[in-house]
Image: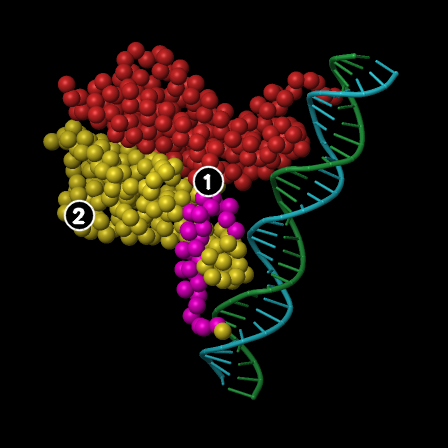
Chain colours: A yellow, B red, C cyan, D green
DNA sequence: TTGTTTATTGACTCGTCAATCAACAAAAAC
DNA sequence: GTTTTTGTTGATTGACGAGTCAATAAACAA
Protein backbone atom coordinates (compact mmCIF):
# COMPACT_ATOMS: atom_id res chain seq x y z
CA UNK A 1 0.00 0.00 0.00
CA UNK A 2 2.37 2.59 -1.24
CA UNK A 3 2.00 6.08 0.12
CA UNK A 4 3.51 8.78 -2.00
CA UNK A 5 6.41 10.95 -0.97
CA UNK A 6 8.26 8.10 0.65
CA UNK A 7 11.62 8.84 -0.88
CA UNK A 8 12.96 11.29 1.70
CA UNK A 9 11.65 9.16 4.54
CA UNK A 10 13.23 6.03 3.16
CA UNK A 11 16.51 7.72 2.44
CA UNK A 12 16.76 9.14 5.91
CA UNK A 13 15.80 5.83 7.48
CA UNK A 14 18.46 4.08 5.43
CA UNK A 15 21.11 6.59 6.38
CA UNK A 16 20.34 6.21 10.05
CA UNK A 17 20.27 2.45 9.74
CA UNK A 18 23.59 2.49 7.93
CA UNK A 19 25.28 4.32 10.77
CA UNK A 20 23.61 2.13 13.35
CA UNK A 21 24.65 -0.99 11.52
CA UNK A 22 28.22 0.16 11.09
CA UNK A 23 28.27 0.92 14.79
CA UNK A 24 26.90 -2.53 15.51
CA UNK A 25 29.19 -4.52 13.23
CA UNK A 26 32.15 -2.19 13.57
CA UNK A 27 33.14 -2.49 9.94
CA UNK A 28 32.07 -1.47 6.49
CA UNK A 29 31.55 -5.18 5.93
CA UNK A 30 27.87 -4.73 6.53
CA UNK A 31 25.29 -6.09 4.15
CA UNK A 32 22.72 -4.04 2.38
CA UNK A 33 20.12 -6.55 3.51
CA UNK A 34 20.89 -5.97 7.16
CA UNK A 35 20.76 -2.23 6.77
CA UNK A 36 17.52 -2.44 4.86
CA UNK A 37 15.98 -4.77 7.40
CA UNK A 38 16.98 -2.41 10.19
CA UNK A 39 15.33 0.40 8.26
CA UNK A 40 12.23 -1.71 7.77
CA UNK A 41 12.34 -2.45 4.08
CA UNK A 42 13.68 -4.86 1.52
CA UNK A 43 17.21 -4.69 0.23
CA UNK A 44 15.86 -4.15 -3.26
CA UNK A 45 14.32 -0.90 -2.11
CA UNK A 46 17.60 0.27 -0.68
CA UNK A 47 19.19 -0.30 -4.03
CA UNK A 48 16.29 1.43 -5.67
CA UNK A 49 16.92 4.62 -3.74
CA UNK A 50 20.68 4.65 -3.49
CA UNK A 51 21.79 2.63 -6.46
CA UNK A 52 24.69 1.00 -4.69
CA UNK A 53 26.09 0.16 -1.31
CA UNK A 54 28.88 2.64 -1.77
CA UNK A 55 26.49 5.47 -2.53
CA UNK A 56 24.69 4.65 0.68
CA UNK A 57 27.89 4.85 2.65
CA UNK A 58 28.77 8.17 1.16
CA UNK A 59 25.33 9.54 1.91
CA UNK A 60 25.63 8.36 5.48
CA UNK A 61 29.05 9.94 5.73
CA UNK A 62 27.75 13.21 4.41
CA UNK A 63 25.03 13.08 7.01
CA UNK A 64 27.50 12.64 9.83
CA UNK A 65 29.63 15.45 8.52
CA UNK A 66 26.62 17.69 8.15
CA UNK A 67 25.57 17.09 11.73
CA UNK A 68 29.04 17.77 12.94
CA UNK A 69 29.31 20.89 10.83
CA UNK A 70 26.05 22.19 12.23
CA UNK A 71 27.27 21.53 15.74
CA UNK A 72 30.43 23.50 15.07
CA UNK A 73 28.61 26.38 13.44
CA UNK A 74 26.18 26.59 16.30
CA UNK A 75 28.94 26.65 18.88
CA UNK A 76 30.89 29.22 16.89
CA UNK A 77 27.89 31.50 16.67
CA UNK A 78 27.54 31.47 20.43
CA UNK A 79 31.19 32.35 21.01
CA UNK A 80 32.12 35.96 21.69
CA UNK A 81 35.88 35.99 21.52
CA UNK A 82 38.58 34.35 19.43
CA UNK A 83 39.54 32.15 22.33
CA UNK A 84 35.89 31.31 22.82
CA UNK A 85 35.72 30.28 19.19
CA UNK A 86 38.55 27.84 19.66
CA UNK A 87 36.84 26.38 22.68
CA UNK A 88 33.63 26.18 20.71
CA UNK A 89 35.24 24.03 18.04
CA UNK A 90 36.69 21.73 20.65
CA UNK A 91 33.44 21.37 22.58
CA UNK A 92 31.43 20.83 19.41
CA UNK A 93 33.75 17.97 18.51
CA UNK A 94 32.85 16.21 21.72
CA UNK A 95 29.18 17.11 21.82
CA UNK A 96 26.79 14.36 22.73
CA UNK A 97 25.41 14.09 19.23
CA UNK A 98 28.78 13.53 17.56
CA UNK A 99 30.77 11.76 20.22
CA UNK A 100 28.73 8.58 20.31
CA UNK A 101 29.94 5.06 19.77
CA UNK A 102 28.15 4.44 16.52
CA UNK A 103 29.15 7.77 15.10
CA UNK A 104 32.73 7.33 16.19
CA UNK A 105 32.75 3.92 14.60
CA UNK A 106 31.44 5.47 11.42
CA UNK A 107 34.21 8.07 11.51
CA UNK A 108 36.82 5.41 11.96
CA UNK A 109 35.51 3.51 9.00
CA UNK A 110 35.31 6.67 6.94
CA UNK A 111 38.99 7.10 7.56
CA UNK A 112 39.58 3.59 6.32
CA UNK A 113 37.48 4.21 3.25
CA UNK A 114 39.13 7.54 2.61
CA UNK A 115 42.41 5.79 2.04
CA UNK A 116 41.17 4.51 -1.29
CA UNK A 117 37.82 6.11 -2.11
CA UNK A 118 38.50 9.48 -3.75
CA UNK A 119 35.10 10.90 -2.84
CA UNK A 120 35.38 9.85 0.77
CA UNK A 121 38.86 11.26 0.88
CA UNK A 122 37.71 14.57 -0.51
CA UNK A 123 34.85 14.83 1.96
CA UNK A 124 37.07 14.18 4.92
CA UNK A 125 39.78 16.50 3.68
CA UNK A 126 37.33 19.32 3.29
CA UNK A 127 36.06 18.94 6.82
CA UNK A 128 39.50 18.50 8.24
CA UNK A 129 40.70 21.65 6.57
CA UNK A 130 37.67 23.51 7.75
CA UNK A 131 38.28 22.59 11.37
CA UNK A 132 41.93 23.48 11.19
CA UNK A 133 41.08 26.73 9.50
CA UNK A 134 38.53 27.60 12.16
CA UNK A 135 41.01 26.87 14.89
CA UNK A 136 43.72 28.74 13.10
CA UNK A 137 41.74 31.94 12.80
CA UNK A 138 40.58 31.66 16.37
CA UNK A 139 44.12 31.30 17.65
CA UNK A 140 45.84 33.78 15.38
CA UNK A 141 45.14 36.88 17.50
CA UNK A 142 46.92 35.40 20.48
CA UNK A 143 49.41 33.06 18.89
CA UNK A 144 50.34 34.77 15.65
CA UNK A 145 52.56 32.59 13.53
CA UNK A 146 52.30 29.70 15.99
CA UNK A 147 48.57 29.43 15.41
CA UNK A 148 48.95 27.02 12.52
CA UNK A 149 50.90 24.44 14.42
CA UNK A 150 48.69 24.73 17.49
CA UNK A 151 45.62 24.24 15.30
CA UNK A 152 47.11 21.12 13.74
CA UNK A 153 47.97 19.80 17.16
CA UNK A 154 44.48 20.35 18.48
CA UNK A 155 42.98 18.70 15.44
CA UNK A 156 45.24 15.70 15.94
CA UNK A 157 44.30 15.53 19.60
CA UNK A 158 40.64 15.48 18.71
CA UNK A 159 41.12 12.66 16.24
CA UNK A 160 43.28 10.83 18.74
CA UNK A 161 40.56 11.12 21.34
CA UNK A 162 38.11 9.62 18.87
CA UNK A 163 40.43 6.71 18.25
CA UNK A 164 40.88 6.07 21.94
CA UNK A 165 37.17 6.26 22.47
CA UNK A 166 36.67 3.34 20.12
CA UNK A 167 38.69 1.10 22.39
CA UNK A 168 37.45 2.39 25.69
CA UNK A 169 35.32 -0.09 27.56
CA UNK A 170 33.08 2.53 29.11
CA UNK A 171 30.84 4.83 27.14
CA UNK A 172 33.00 7.60 25.73
CA UNK A 173 33.06 10.63 27.96
CA UNK A 174 33.00 13.69 25.75
CA UNK A 175 33.20 16.19 28.55
CA UNK A 176 36.38 14.69 29.91
CA UNK A 177 37.97 14.56 26.48
CA UNK A 178 37.03 18.14 25.75
CA UNK A 179 38.51 19.10 29.08
CA UNK A 180 41.76 17.44 28.18
CA UNK A 181 42.07 19.22 24.87
CA UNK A 182 41.16 22.50 26.45
CA UNK A 183 43.92 22.00 28.98
CA UNK A 184 46.34 21.99 26.11
CA UNK A 185 44.73 25.12 24.77
CA UNK A 186 45.18 26.77 28.15
CA UNK A 187 48.83 25.83 28.21
CA UNK A 188 49.45 27.08 24.71
CA UNK A 189 47.70 30.37 25.26
CA UNK A 190 49.43 30.99 28.55
CA UNK A 191 52.90 30.58 27.13
CA UNK A 192 52.51 31.36 23.49
CA UNK A 193 50.98 34.80 23.83
CA UNK A 194 53.46 36.97 21.96
CA UNK A 195 52.14 40.38 22.90
CA UNK B 1 60.82 -29.65 -4.71
CA UNK B 2 60.05 -29.07 -1.11
CA UNK B 3 62.91 -28.05 1.07
CA UNK B 4 62.47 -28.71 4.73
CA UNK B 5 62.24 -26.03 7.37
CA UNK B 6 60.11 -23.76 5.23
CA UNK B 7 57.59 -23.01 7.91
CA UNK B 8 59.26 -19.99 9.51
CA UNK B 9 60.19 -18.60 6.11
CA UNK B 10 56.67 -18.97 4.79
CA UNK B 11 55.10 -17.55 7.92
CA UNK B 12 57.31 -14.51 7.85
CA UNK B 13 56.71 -13.99 4.15
CA UNK B 14 52.97 -14.20 4.70
CA UNK B 15 53.08 -11.73 7.55
CA UNK B 16 54.99 -9.25 5.49
CA UNK B 17 52.70 -9.76 2.54
CA UNK B 18 49.66 -9.31 4.76
CA UNK B 19 50.85 -5.90 5.90
CA UNK B 20 51.83 -4.90 2.40
CA UNK B 21 48.48 -5.98 1.03
CA UNK B 22 46.54 -4.17 3.74
CA UNK B 23 48.59 -1.11 2.94
CA UNK B 24 47.81 -1.55 -0.70
CA UNK B 25 44.09 -2.19 -0.44
CA UNK B 26 43.57 -0.04 2.64
CA UNK B 27 41.13 -2.44 4.22
CA UNK B 28 40.91 -5.79 5.89
CA UNK B 29 38.88 -6.81 2.89
CA UNK B 30 41.91 -8.41 1.36
CA UNK B 31 41.81 -11.92 0.02
CA UNK B 32 43.99 -14.71 1.22
CA UNK B 33 44.76 -15.47 -2.41
CA UNK B 34 46.19 -12.02 -3.00
CA UNK B 35 48.32 -12.17 0.11
CA UNK B 36 49.53 -15.62 -0.79
CA UNK B 37 50.34 -14.60 -4.32
CA UNK B 38 52.26 -11.60 -3.03
CA UNK B 39 54.19 -13.94 -0.78
CA UNK B 40 54.86 -16.27 -3.69
CA UNK B 41 52.71 -19.27 -2.82
CA UNK B 42 49.26 -20.70 -3.16
CA UNK B 43 46.38 -19.71 -0.95
CA UNK B 44 46.08 -23.29 0.21
CA UNK B 45 49.55 -23.05 1.70
CA UNK B 46 48.64 -19.90 3.56
CA UNK B 47 45.71 -21.73 5.08
CA UNK B 48 47.96 -24.65 5.84
CA UNK B 49 50.27 -22.52 7.94
CA UNK B 50 47.85 -20.13 9.56
CA UNK B 51 44.59 -22.00 9.54
CA UNK B 52 42.48 -18.95 8.86
CA UNK B 53 42.54 -15.45 7.52
CA UNK B 54 41.89 -14.06 10.95
CA UNK B 55 44.83 -15.90 12.46
CA UNK B 56 46.99 -14.41 9.74
CA UNK B 57 45.81 -10.91 10.60
CA UNK B 58 46.49 -11.41 14.26
CA UNK B 59 49.95 -12.75 13.53
CA UNK B 60 50.66 -9.73 11.34
CA UNK B 61 49.36 -7.44 14.05
CA UNK B 62 51.58 -9.09 16.64
CA UNK B 63 54.50 -8.59 14.33
CA UNK B 64 53.82 -4.87 13.99
CA UNK B 65 53.41 -4.51 17.73
CA UNK B 66 56.60 -6.44 18.34
CA UNK B 67 58.56 -4.19 16.02
CA UNK B 68 57.13 -1.13 17.68
CA UNK B 69 57.80 -2.51 21.11
CA UNK B 70 61.41 -3.17 20.19
CA UNK B 71 61.75 0.35 18.88
CA UNK B 72 60.42 1.77 22.13
CA UNK B 73 62.62 -0.44 24.28
CA UNK B 74 65.67 0.50 22.27
CA UNK B 75 64.96 4.20 22.58
CA UNK B 76 64.23 3.90 26.29
CA UNK B 77 67.50 2.10 26.89
CA UNK B 78 69.39 4.97 25.29
CA UNK B 79 67.68 7.61 27.39
CA UNK B 80 69.41 8.95 30.46
CA UNK B 81 66.77 11.00 32.22
CA UNK B 82 63.05 10.78 32.88
CA UNK B 83 62.40 13.54 30.40
CA UNK B 84 64.64 11.76 27.92
CA UNK B 85 62.55 8.63 28.39
CA UNK B 86 59.41 10.52 27.49
CA UNK B 87 61.08 11.87 24.39
CA UNK B 88 62.29 8.39 23.57
CA UNK B 89 58.75 7.01 23.55
CA UNK B 90 57.59 9.82 21.31
CA UNK B 91 60.45 9.46 18.85
CA UNK B 92 60.12 5.70 18.74
CA UNK B 93 56.48 6.13 17.79
CA UNK B 94 57.51 8.08 14.73
CA UNK B 95 60.56 6.07 13.81
CA UNK B 96 61.01 5.24 10.18
CA UNK B 97 60.23 1.58 10.69
CA UNK B 98 56.86 2.16 12.36
CA UNK B 99 55.68 5.38 10.78
CA UNK B 100 55.21 4.06 7.27
CA UNK B 101 52.08 4.11 5.16
CA UNK B 102 51.50 0.39 5.11
CA UNK B 103 52.13 0.02 8.80
CA UNK B 104 49.93 2.96 9.64
CA UNK B 105 47.21 1.50 7.48
CA UNK B 106 47.60 -1.75 9.37
CA UNK B 107 47.25 0.09 12.67
CA UNK B 108 44.12 1.81 11.51
CA UNK B 109 42.58 -1.46 10.50
CA UNK B 110 43.62 -3.07 13.74
CA UNK B 111 41.66 -0.40 15.50
CA UNK B 112 38.67 -1.28 13.39
CA UNK B 113 39.11 -4.95 14.12
CA UNK B 114 39.64 -4.30 17.81
CA UNK B 115 36.11 -2.99 18.07
CA UNK B 116 34.76 -6.50 17.74
CA UNK B 117 37.62 -8.98 17.88
CA UNK B 118 38.41 -9.70 21.52
CA UNK B 119 41.95 -10.85 20.81
CA UNK B 120 42.73 -7.80 18.71
CA UNK B 121 41.26 -5.61 21.37
CA UNK B 122 43.34 -7.22 24.05
CA UNK B 123 46.53 -6.83 22.03
CA UNK B 124 45.95 -3.17 21.38
CA UNK B 125 44.91 -2.47 24.94
CA UNK B 126 48.06 -4.04 26.28
CA UNK B 127 50.26 -1.93 24.06
CA UNK B 128 48.31 1.20 24.70
CA UNK B 129 48.58 0.73 28.41
CA UNK B 130 52.26 0.03 28.12
CA UNK B 131 52.90 3.28 26.28
CA UNK B 132 50.84 5.33 28.68
CA UNK B 133 52.53 3.66 31.59
CA UNK B 134 55.97 4.40 30.15
CA UNK B 135 55.06 8.01 29.61
CA UNK B 136 53.50 8.26 33.00
CA UNK B 137 56.57 7.07 34.83
CA UNK B 138 58.77 9.28 32.74
CA UNK B 139 56.70 12.34 33.53
CA UNK B 140 55.96 11.65 37.16
CA UNK B 141 59.16 13.19 38.57
CA UNK B 142 58.42 16.54 37.00
CA UNK B 143 54.64 16.54 36.82
CA UNK B 144 53.58 14.57 39.84
CA UNK B 145 49.85 13.98 39.85
CA UNK B 146 49.45 15.64 36.48
CA UNK B 147 51.58 12.97 34.82
CA UNK B 148 48.65 10.70 34.11
CA UNK B 149 46.67 13.21 32.16
CA UNK B 150 49.70 14.43 30.25
CA UNK B 151 50.55 10.85 29.33
CA UNK B 152 47.04 10.24 28.06
CA UNK B 153 47.20 13.42 26.06
CA UNK B 154 50.50 12.51 24.46
CA UNK B 155 49.21 9.05 23.61
CA UNK B 156 46.16 10.58 21.98
CA UNK B 157 48.33 12.99 20.03
CA UNK B 158 50.42 10.15 18.71
CA UNK B 159 47.36 8.25 17.57
CA UNK B 160 45.94 11.40 16.07
CA UNK B 161 49.13 11.96 14.14
CA UNK B 162 48.85 8.43 12.78
CA UNK B 163 45.31 9.10 11.66
CA UNK B 164 46.29 12.30 9.93
CA UNK B 165 49.19 10.57 8.26
CA UNK B 166 46.83 8.13 6.59
CA UNK B 167 45.02 10.94 4.89
CA UNK B 168 48.01 13.12 4.14
CA UNK B 169 48.81 13.37 0.49
CA UNK B 170 52.54 13.47 1.01
CA UNK B 171 54.55 10.70 2.53
CA UNK B 172 54.13 10.93 6.29
CA UNK B 173 56.88 12.94 7.92
CA UNK B 174 57.71 11.28 11.20
CA UNK B 175 60.28 13.83 12.26
CA UNK B 176 57.84 16.70 11.94
CA UNK B 177 55.14 14.84 13.82
CA UNK B 178 57.53 13.91 16.60
CA UNK B 179 58.56 17.54 16.79
CA UNK B 180 54.98 18.61 17.20
CA UNK B 181 54.31 16.21 20.03
CA UNK B 182 57.54 17.18 21.70
CA UNK B 183 56.47 20.80 21.57
CA UNK B 184 53.54 19.88 23.70
CA UNK B 185 55.86 18.06 26.04
CA UNK B 186 58.01 21.18 26.29
CA UNK B 187 55.01 23.28 27.13
CA UNK B 188 53.74 20.89 29.74
CA UNK B 189 57.09 20.52 31.42
CA UNK B 190 57.73 24.24 31.46
CA UNK B 191 54.50 25.08 33.17
CA UNK B 192 53.59 21.96 35.00
CA UNK B 193 56.75 21.53 37.03
CA UNK B 194 55.46 21.66 40.60
CA UNK B 195 58.75 22.04 42.48
C1' DT C 1 63.46 -50.27 0.01
C1' DT C 2 59.68 -48.83 2.18
C1' DG C 3 57.27 -46.01 4.93
C1' DT C 4 56.60 -41.40 7.25
C1' DT C 5 56.82 -36.68 7.61
C1' DT C 6 56.87 -32.02 5.43
C1' DA C 7 55.82 -29.08 1.54
C1' DT C 8 52.85 -27.81 -2.01
C1' DT C 9 49.06 -27.03 -5.17
C1' DG C 10 44.80 -27.28 -8.37
C1' DA C 11 40.31 -28.23 -8.12
C1' DC C 12 36.26 -28.15 -5.59
C1' DT C 13 32.53 -26.98 -2.09
C1' DC C 14 29.73 -24.03 0.07
C1' DG C 15 28.14 -19.85 1.53
C1' DT C 16 27.39 -15.02 1.02
C1' DC C 17 26.11 -10.89 -1.03
C1' DA C 18 25.54 -6.91 -4.40
C1' DA C 19 22.78 -5.99 -7.93
C1' DT C 20 18.89 -6.93 -11.25
C1' DC C 21 14.32 -8.07 -12.71
C1' DA C 22 9.70 -9.18 -13.22
C1' DA C 23 5.62 -8.47 -11.14
C1' DC C 24 2.24 -6.32 -8.28
C1' DA C 25 -0.22 -2.30 -5.89
C1' DA C 26 -1.80 2.19 -5.18
C1' DA C 27 -2.08 6.92 -6.26
C1' DA C 28 -2.24 10.61 -9.84
C1' DA C 29 -2.91 12.29 -14.34
C1' DC C 30 -5.47 12.39 -18.43
C1' DG D 1 -11.42 4.26 -16.93
C1' DT D 2 -7.24 3.78 -18.75
C1' DT D 3 -2.46 5.08 -18.52
C1' DT D 4 1.48 6.58 -16.10
C1' DT D 5 4.14 7.32 -12.22
C1' DT D 6 5.79 5.91 -7.68
C1' DG D 7 6.55 2.42 -4.25
C1' DT D 8 7.59 -2.23 -3.13
C1' DT D 9 9.22 -6.98 -2.92
C1' DG D 10 10.50 -12.09 -3.69
C1' DA D 11 13.21 -14.50 -6.51
C1' DT D 12 17.17 -14.83 -9.26
C1' DT D 13 21.74 -14.08 -11.16
C1' DG D 14 26.48 -13.83 -11.10
C1' DA D 15 30.65 -13.21 -8.90
C1' DC D 16 33.75 -13.84 -5.48
C1' DG D 17 36.18 -15.85 -1.71
C1' DA D 18 37.29 -18.79 2.59
C1' DG D 19 38.33 -23.10 3.66
C1' DT D 20 38.86 -28.28 2.40
C1' DC D 21 40.76 -32.19 0.11
C1' DA D 22 42.99 -35.36 -2.61
C1' DA D 23 47.05 -35.90 -4.97
C1' DT D 24 52.04 -35.20 -5.86
C1' DA D 25 56.78 -34.88 -4.56
C1' DA D 26 60.85 -34.38 -2.08
C1' DA D 27 63.42 -35.38 2.09
C1' DC D 28 64.26 -38.33 5.81
C1' DA D 29 63.99 -42.53 8.81
C1' DA D 30 63.60 -47.57 9.25
Horizontal arrangement in the rendering, residue A149 relative to residue A52 (left or right) = left
Q: Position of residue B50 (x, y in %)?
A: 60, 29
Mark identifier at residue A79: 2
Q: Chain of mark 2?
A: A
Quadrant of the rendered structure where residue B87 is? top left
* Quadrant placement of the N terminus of chain B: top right
- SS type, badge 1: loop
The region drawn magenta spans A2-31
Note whether residue A150 is visible: yes
Count of residue discs: 2
Note whether residue A145 is visible: no
Query: Above or below — where is B55 with respect to A3?
Result: above
Q: Dot 1: few (<14), some (14–19), or many (≥20) neighbours within 10 Å?
A: some
Quadrant of the rendered structure where residue B81 is? top left
Horizontal arrangement in the rendering, residue C22 relative to residue B102 (left or right) = right
* Quadrant placement of the C terminus of chain B: top left
Residue in front for this viewpoint, B187 or A162: A162
**Spatial CA span between label 2 and label 1:** 39 Å
Magenta segment, principal secondary structure? helix
Which residue has dot 1 on it? Answer: B116
**Residue A12 lies in the magenta stretch:** yes
Amino acid sequence: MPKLGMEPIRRSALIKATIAEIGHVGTLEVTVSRIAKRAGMSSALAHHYFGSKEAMFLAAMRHVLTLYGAEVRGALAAADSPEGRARAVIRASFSASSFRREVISAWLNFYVLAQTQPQARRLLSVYQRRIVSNLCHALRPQLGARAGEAAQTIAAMIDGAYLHAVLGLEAPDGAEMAQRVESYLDLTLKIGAPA
